[in-house]
């Protein structure tokens, strides 16, 4: 069951409803068009129910809450707008609390009762089976001095509802009166109009049985209700496609636990991040939208300039987005995060986007509150993330959960346990020596042999293995989906050049394959077959609808606008995903420059914004992007370029602009960059 909280319209007796509320209603209709509220919900009407619901919410964690932010109104206002604020949602139940404003405005109890009947009749004409509960008014009497009028109104409505079908009268008046027949002040706020926290608890206790009754009547018996699967999402930071043994048997690094995951499920050989740097990809996973739609197109804060001034970059994920964490939470999931968020802090932290409210921030990363000691040698918080994940899984094994583990490894500064570093220093003696290539002004590593980076990967792989072992020991492996993905390609062209992505070109910060093609694995028990490989191009926006479908939750295409469910692929079928797009209007720390790209089938085009040059590659025949075919394939080049430009218009992509402060001198150029 989903619950939706809709407060009533602000009271303004001096204006007609159409004059007072039309602008606000239109605004909310646009919002609903972008993010449709659920149907078959419980719809609350009345400002007081907002605070009451906050008390109830902890007992109904799987229910949808939408707060329109209105204040109190007269019943006639809700009737006037029923066609737009009630009926379109097709609620299964309405909890209605109103009437005080009507009496305060001078209406008699009889007139107010007539308005309530008109509301019920209008709604029932379109929704004959909707259940309606009237939450009686009472606390406002102390301020407005209309006790007898309120009691008369309540009596009229109570009698009316007793005669109707699917109607409930929730009487709160007696609960707020003391032995002397006067309101109990300890349950009221200072203005004696709205309840204190204690008062709202009383209200919540009165409403709770009706919601429990409704919940039972709309929930199938446990024996026939499918158990929703858990989800564990391992998101790595800067891990390259060629950094795991499943993709690269000759890698210098050792990843036995990650390789076991690949053997258990489906390994993607054309899985892409939505951006060659971290924050935009993370936003795409959370929202199912391409980075330009959220405004996050660079790492936060980003914004380096050179020949061009970087396009604006949002510093946090907008709260208007319904994240995948919120969608899962509202479907009854317990959500967990430990690690790197990088989508905003404070009011924009994970707690504001669907994760646990009890998080602590340590060195920029978020963790559940815990008294567990931090591992002694854990420079990337790798073991801390695994420790907290193990604790969470063990305590939530009997109910569905979403565990999001955005590790800080293998991002620079690289670091690992000394014993592991020593192991790979010995191994390096038999590895190929350093070798370098050139990517524009940046040198690029061509060999994997960094012992510290290798040690960091082993420590990470071991942590992942511990989490998976916890799932298996808990007996929930067959109902736990496991996802492994990196936020962008391996770092090969700057900042220590710790890895090589060969045969892929370049790396993090570039729109070549080395910067956006990721190690990607999905294990979905009962859906994926062990050891399967998929070469269909997919992208990080696709996780959102995939999770919803795997969990039996209705899709929300107006939210995950740029995502396509990968379930057909996971089942071994085909998927016409359509073209993939990238927009990176910034100068990266890794040497890349403002650019955009599109991949359609086997063809990929990159457009450079500084000089409007383009490169065209056949990825199937040339995965290393060595042969630019733009001059040889002018028709294909033009078609893909037009496709890219049209897409930028659709998603509202912002472009870089000329930089009047740029100086062509190389030294000055480097300072500007």
Image: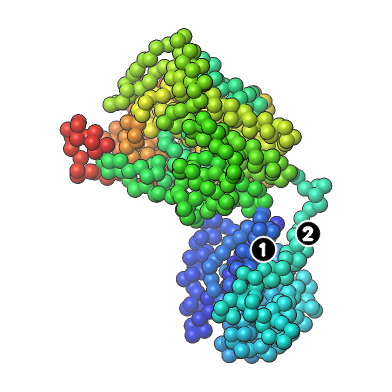
Q: Are marks 1 and 2 in contact (CB under 8 Å)?
A: no
How far across and down, in percent of the image, does residue 505 sit?
40, 24
Q: Residue at x 32, y 35 (%)?
A: 593
Q: Is residue 7 left or right of residue 395?
A: left
Disc 1/disc 2 C-alpha distance (Å): 16 Å
Which numbered disc flags the more N-terminal residue, 1 or 2?
Answer: 1
Label 2: how many residues lie within 10 Å, few (<14), some (14-19) or many (20+)?
A: few
Q: Is residue 551 left or right of residue 425?
A: right
Q: Is residue 667 left or right of residue 289?
A: left
User: Of helix, strand and loop, which one carries label 1?
Assistant: helix
Name the residue carrying label 2: 216
Of the residues tagged 1 and 2, which is closer to the observer? 1
Vertically, is 13 above or below 515? below
How far across and down, in percent of the image, does residue 535 sit?
55, 27
| Nearest to the observer: residue 206 or residue 371 | 371
User: Of helix, strand and loop, which one carries label 2?
Assistant: helix
Name the residue carrying label 1: 56
Which quarter of the image is occupied by the N terminus? Answer: bottom right
How far across and down, in percent of the image, does residue 138 sit?
66, 81
């Amino acid at each position: 069951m989903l619950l939706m909280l809709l407060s009533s319209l602000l009271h303004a007796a001096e204006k007609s409803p159409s004059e007072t509320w039309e602008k606000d209603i239109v605004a909310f209709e646009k919002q609903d068009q972008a993010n449709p509220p659920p149907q078959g919900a419980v719809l609350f009407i009345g400002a007081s129910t907002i605070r009451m619901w906050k008390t109830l919410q902890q007992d109904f964690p799987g229910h949808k809450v939408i707060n329109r932010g209105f204040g109190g109104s007269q019943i006639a206002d809700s009737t006037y707008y029923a066609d737009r604020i009630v009926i379109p949602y097709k609620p299964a139940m309405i909890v209605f609390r109103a009437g005080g404003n009507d009496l305060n405005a001078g209406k008699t109890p009889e007139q107010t009762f007539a308005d309530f009947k008109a509301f019920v009749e209008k709604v029932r004409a379109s929704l004959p089976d909707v259940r309606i509960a009237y939450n009686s008014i009472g606390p406002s009497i102390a301020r407005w001095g209309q006790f007898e009028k309120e009691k008369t109104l309540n009596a009229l409505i109570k009698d009316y509802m007793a005669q109707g079908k699917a109607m409930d009268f929730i009487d709160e008046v007696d609960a707020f009166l003391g032995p002397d027949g006067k309101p109990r002040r300890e349950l009221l706020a200072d203005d004696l109009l709205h309840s204190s926290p204690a008062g709202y608890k009383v209200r919540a206790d009165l409403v709770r049985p009706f919601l429990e009754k409704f919940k039972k009547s709309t929930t199938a018996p446990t024996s026939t209700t499918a158990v929703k699967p858990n989800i564990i999402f391992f998101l790595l930071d800067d891990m390259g496609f060629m950094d795991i043994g499943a993709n690269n048997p000759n890698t210098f690094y050792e990843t036995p636990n990650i390789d076991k995951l690949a053997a258990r499920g489906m390994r993607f050989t054309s899985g892409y991040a939505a951006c060659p740097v971290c924050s935009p990809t993370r936003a795409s996973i959370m929202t199912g939208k391409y980075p330009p739609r959220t405004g996050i197109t660079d790492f936060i804060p980003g914004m380096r300039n050179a020949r061009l001034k970087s396009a604006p970059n949002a510093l946090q994920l907008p709260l208007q987005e319904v994240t995948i964490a919120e969608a899962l939470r509202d479907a009854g999931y317990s959500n967990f995060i430990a690690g790197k968020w990088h989508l905003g802090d404070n009011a924009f932290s994970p707690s504001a986007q669907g994760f646990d409210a009890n998080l602590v921030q340590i060195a920029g990363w978020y963790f559940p509150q815990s008294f567990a000691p931090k591992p002694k040698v854990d420079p990337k918080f790798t073991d801390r993330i695994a420790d907290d994940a193990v604790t969470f899984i063990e305590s939530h094994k009997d109910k569905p959960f979403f565990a999001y583990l955005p590790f800080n490894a293998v991002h620079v500064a690289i670091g690992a346990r000394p014993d592991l570093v020593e192991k790979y220093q010995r191994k390096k003696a038999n590895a190929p020596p350093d070798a370098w290539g050139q990517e524009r002004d940046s040198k690029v590593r061509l060999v994997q042999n960094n012992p510290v980076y290798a040690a960091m990967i082993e420590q990470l792989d071991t942590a992942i293995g511990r989490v998976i072992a916890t799932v298996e020991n808990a007996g929930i492996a067959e109902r736990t989906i496991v996802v492994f993905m990196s936020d962008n390609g391996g770092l090969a062209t700057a900042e220590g050049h710790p890895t090589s992505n060969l045969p892929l070109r370049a790396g993090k910060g570039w729109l070549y394959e080395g910067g956006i093609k990721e190690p990607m694995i999905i294990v979905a028990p009962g859906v994926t077959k062990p050891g399967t490989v998929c070469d269909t191009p997919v992208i990080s926006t696709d996780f959102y609808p995939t999770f919803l479908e795997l969990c039996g939750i209705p899709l929300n295409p107006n939210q995950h606008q740029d995502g396509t469910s990968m379930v057909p692929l996971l089942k071994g079928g085909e998927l016409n995903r359509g073209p993939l797009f990238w927009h990176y209007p910034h100068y990266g720390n890794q040497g890349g420059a403002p650019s955009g790209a599109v991949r359609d089938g086997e063809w990929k085009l990159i457009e450079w914004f500084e000089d409007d040059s383009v490169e065209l590659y056949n990825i199937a025949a040339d995965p290393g992007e060595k042969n630019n075919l733009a001059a040889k394939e002018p028709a294909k080049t033009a078609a893909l370029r037009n496709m890219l430009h049209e897409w930028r218009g659709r998603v509202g992509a912002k472009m870089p602009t000329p930089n009047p402060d740029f100086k062509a001198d190389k030294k000055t150029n480097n300072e500007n960059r």
